[in-house]
Each structure stands twice: as structure tokens, then as C-alpha cells.
Amino acid sequence: MPRTEPLVARMREFGTTIFAEMTALATRTGSVNLGQGFPDTDGPPSMLDAACAAIRAGINQYPPGPGMPALRAAIARQRTERYGLDYDPDGEVLVTVGATEAVAASLLALCGPGDEVVVFEPYYDSYAASIALAGAVRRPVTLRPDVDGRFTFDPADLRAAVGPRTRALLVNTPHNPTGTVFTRDELAAIAQVCVDADVIAITDEVYEYLTFDDATHIPLATYPGMRERTVSISSAGKTFSVTGWKIGWVCAPVALRGAVQAVKQFTTFTANGALQLAVAHALDNEMPWVEGNRAALQTKRDRLAAGLRGGGFGVHLPAGTYFVQADVRPLGIDDAAGYAWALPERVGVAAIPTEVFYDDKAAGRPFVRFAFCKRDEVIDDAVRRLTSAPG
């Protein structure tokens, strides 16, 4: 055995992820898993066929470190056509092993010991771990429900969180786990803080296509003064329902993209070439499928939200992503974490206690995150179990 604690101090608060723990608990108890955010249906058939064809054609060895040229070109076209943002596929686009690696590599490349990273909480759990890996310090800004139940932030809180040691502002929109899609005014406030304080923005935009009702995703890089200081991150996993493929990307100015690649090349080096070619095909050819999937997810959101309301939960209707925030206080429960951990054994449903994504635990204590990216019959089964169990 090691003579000392084997895990470095900065990582000791991070154990097995909540997603792995809840999925294991769901498997052990035979529960309906509305915890981890992955679909239970596949993406567009032509994309799957393109992956198989590329494998059979021999695209099975190391692809170029920055990514397959066809995928980098398709990503650049997507950013131009959808958002009017022009990126050089050879110098400003980098393919990564999912968005999680893109975020981690960006933080490791751009932040060092003692630097501060401002992040909106609740935050995806890998953010905190990646900030710690960089030796940096996280400075959370809390999103709180407004009178309409939409999670938002106070611009004064954001300004107060930024100081002389702030190196980066990590922004996730559409936001996991609250489902908020930042508005033009909210993004303008974030952009102004970045410009005024001369800090880098790292934007996680993996749910960019999955917005509902009248909400529209707007990249922070489109704001004045932001393209040159923004590392924009997205992936194929959520857009095309292939979360296991782990094909993500970074779009950033040459210097920032180069810094991220300098780290990325010593972590995974590169990503699966055949799957990259399939994603390139999908970006160029499967946007109608993406729109159909978005519409289907909106219907699933409404289906789950109605079921939860019928069961007595308070429901915060999301404007994007895969997730509904449910408030357990109308059920007479104060501790949503305890409730969520007991659910699989008690009623056979797994969900995520939102408290684990906060530094301010009190702010997250009432909420449980339920995923609706499942087949209708799975959602209905979960609602039936939740609403028919005693107590």
C-alpha cells in the first residue's frame, strides 16, 4: 500500500461521479433510469451507416491529431451557416473526445494554479473536477428561479465574482441541469463582464439544437469583442443521439485553439476516425432529423412535466436540454438528495439530486433532476411508479 494518501489533495473531493453511482443503483434495483442523460434510441440511420462503411473501408488507425479534415470542415460550415461565425477548419477547429475532454483540455491549457474560474451553478460535475485538475479556484455564481420558475442570475453577482485573479468564465447554455437558455440580455451581460475584465470565455454548447418553445441558442462568440476571447465547445452526442461516440470539438482563435491542442495531444491524442467521418456526414445531411428529434424531445418534456405535476411535484419547465428540475417541497419533503437516493429502492426510479452540482448546497436542496430523453413508454412507467407509490 502507498505510504501516503495516493490521490492528490486537490482531487480528494471528487470520487465516483453521481451519474455512475445512480446508474449502478438503477441497474441493481431494476429501476427506470431517469438519472443519466442519454437517449434510449439511436441517431439518424444514414449516420450509423456512414460509420459502418468507414470502418469497413479501413478507417481504423490513428486519424490526424486535430481531427479528420472532413469533420473540421463540416464543423466550420455549421458555425458559419447557423451563427455567422467563420472559423478556419485548419487552424481554428479541433476535434476532441467529447465535450468533456474539450472542457478539461481548455481549462488545463488556459488556467493555472491560483487562477480563478467563474462558473454558473448548478454546474455539470466535470467542471469542478477539471478546474481542480488545473490547480485553479472555482468562483460560482448561483442561478436561482425567478417568479416564473426560470433559473437565472443576478448580473451584480456575476460582476462581484470576477476579480484580479479571474482567468476564465465557464458558460453552459443551454444549461444542464436547469434547462435555462440564456437570453440575449443575459449573454450581453456576460460578454460585457468578459470584455471589461479581459477574461477568456469557455462555452459549453452541447445542447445547442435542443431548445424548446421560443428559446433560441445564441453563441457568446457572436457578441462584440467575444470571438477573439472565446473557446466554443460542442459535440455530436446530444445533437445526434450518439452520446457513446464521444466526438466533440473546439472552435477558437488560432492561439487559443493551439493552446487547447497542446494539452489534448497528451491526453487522448485523437478520436475515432470512422465516427468522425460519420459525424461530418450528419452535420452536412441530417439537420432535418435533428429538428424532428428536437420536436420529439419537446413533446417528451411536456409529457414528463405533466406527469410530475400530477404527482404533486413543483416543476420548472426547461427551455432546453434533456432535463426537468422538480421541486420536492410541495410533497412535504425538505431533503431532495435523501429523497433521490431512496427512490430506486422505494419506487424503482432513478434521478439525480441537483444539490450535488452546487457549492451553495442550500440553493440546490429542494431539486431533483429527471431526464426526459427516453421513449414515451419509459417516461410513462416512471411517472406511474412515482405517483402510485405510498408516501
Image (cartoon, rainbow, N blue to C red):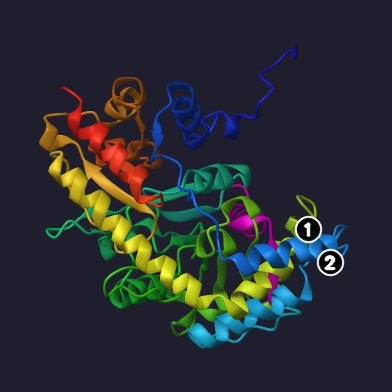
Left or right: 334 as drawn, with respect to 185: left
Q: Quadrant of the N terminus?
A: top right
Q: Write the residue at 46% across / 42% down.
A: 36
Q: Write the residue at 66% across / 19% down.
A: 5
Is residue 110 located in the magenta-colored stretch of the structure?
A: yes
Q: Nearer the viewer, residue 354 or 282?
A: 282
Label 1–label 2 contact, CB within 8 A:
yes
- Residue 64: mark in rendering: 2
Q: Amino acid at mark 2?
A: Pro
Residue holding disc 1: 270
User: Which quadrant of the figure has residue 346?
Assistant: top left
Residue 314, percent across and down?
16, 45
User: In the image, is residue 39 above or below residue 11?
Assistant: below
Q: Residues within 10 Å of mark 1 (few under 14, many from 20)?
A: many
- Who comes first in sequence, dot 1 or dot 2? 2
Q: Disc 1 and disc 2: Cα gap in Å?
A: 7 Å
Q: Quadrant of the C terminus?
A: top left
Q: Can residue 111 be seen at all in this image of the molecule?
A: no
Residue 247, percent across and down?
65, 60
Disc 2 on helix, strand or loop?
A: loop
Is residue 350 located in the magenta-colored stretch of the structure?
A: no
Q: Residues within 10 Å of mark 2 (few under 14, many from 20)?
A: few
Q: Amino acid at mark 1?
A: Thr
User: Which quadrant of the figure has residue 367?
Assistant: top left
User: In the image, is residue 30 above or below residue 259?
Assistant: above
Residue 43, percent across and down?
55, 61
Disc 1 on helix, strand or loop?
A: loop
Q: Nearer the viewer, residue 135 or 350?
A: 350
Magenta span of residues = 92-113
Q: Can residue 228 be seen at all in this image of the molecule?
A: yes
